[in-house]
Image: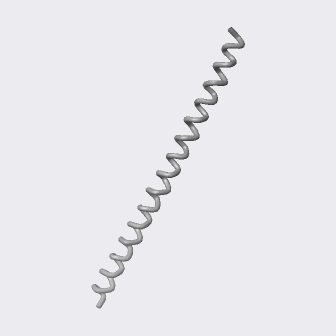
Amino acid sequence: MSSNSLSANSSSSSMFSYTAVLRAILFFSIFFICFLHENFMGYKRTHKFFKRKLAKIL
């Protein structure tokens, strides 16, 4: 009886951790892509801005 409930509990906990890990991976991948995209666009913008500033100075 006790061993049966223990096995059921362990299987449910493993299922929960599996879904949680999947959700975390999905969330982090989306966040990472958005972060990279924002960084890249920001870098391009600042690069253009600095180019203009340098052109004005020179």
- Residue drawn at (30%, 80%), measured in percent from left and top? 7
Q: Give left or right: position of 8 versus 48.
A: left
Picture quadrant where residue 22 is located? bottom left
Q: Nearer the viewer, residue 9 or 48?
A: 48
- Direction bottom: furthest residue: 1
x, y percentage for residue 27?
A: 50, 56
25, above or below 57, in the image: below
- Residue drawn at (44%, 56%), measured in percent from left and top? 25
The quadrant the N terminus occupies is bottom left
Q: Nearer the viewer, residue 17 or 28?
A: 28
The quadrant the C terminus occupies is top right
x, y percentage for residue 34?
A: 55, 46
Q: Give left or right: position of 8 versus 41.
A: left
39, above or below 26, in the image: above
- Residue drawn at (41%, 71%), measured in percent from left and top? 16
Q: Nearer the viewer, residue 21 or 56?
A: 56
44, above or below 21, in the image: above
x, y percentage for residue 20?
A: 44, 65
Colouring of the image = one colour
- Residue drawn at (67%, 13%), measured in percent from left and top? 55
- Direction right: furthest residue: 56
Q: Give left or right: position of 30 versus 6.
A: right
In this figure, what is the number of numbered marks? 0
x, y percentage for residue 33?
A: 50, 46
Q: Give left or right: position of 26 versus 43.
A: left
3, above or below 36, in the image: below
